[in-house]
Amino acid sequence: MVEKQYTISASEGLHARPTSLLVGSLAPFSSDITLIYNDKSVNMKSILGVMSLGVASGSTITVRAEGADENEAIAKIDEVMKSEGLAG
């Protein structure tokens, strides 16, 4: 299992367009990927699940990946978080 924390820096928080790109980028991975925020956890491969959390700017989230390609999945999340300006 790999776990990483991110502080959301985008002024709109995790809003629809970048969240859609983030969720879409995880489709090729077989690992279970979970986003944890305010003691709630959702499948990070579900756009509705992620959007339902209402993650605001300045919030800290935890991403947990567990499975055969967990390291690659976290690397992809890092890449998209930076490229979309979601987290520094």
Image (cartoon, rainbow, N blue to C red):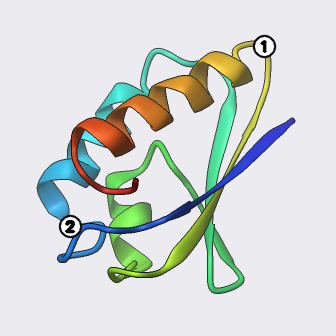
Q: For the point 56% across and 74% down, which residue is it?
A: 60
Apparent side of residue 41 relative to residue 68 in the rendered image (left or right)? left
Apparent side of residue 68 relative to residue 44 in the rendered image (left or right)? right
Image quadrant in which the N terminus is located: top right
- The local crowd at label 1, few if under 14, some if 14 to 19, many if 20 or more residues have their Cα within 10 Å, is few
Q: Position of residue 84 (x, y in %)?
A: 22, 44
What is the secondary structure assignment of the residue under circle 1? loop
Q: Position of residue 36 (x, y in %)?
A: 64, 67
- The local crowd at label 2, few if under 14, some if 14 to 19, many if 20 or more residues have their Cα within 10 Å, is some
Type of amino acid at the residue the image marks with label 1: Ala
Q: For the point 44% across and 78% down, which residue is it?
A: 53
Q: Position of residue 30 (x, y in %)?
A: 63, 19
Q: For the point 42% across and 24% down, which residue is it?
A: 27
Which residue is label 2 attached to? Answer: 15
Which residue is label 1 attached to? Answer: 68
Type of amino acid at the residue the image marks with label 2: His
Q: For the point 63% across and 41% down, which residue is it?
A: 33
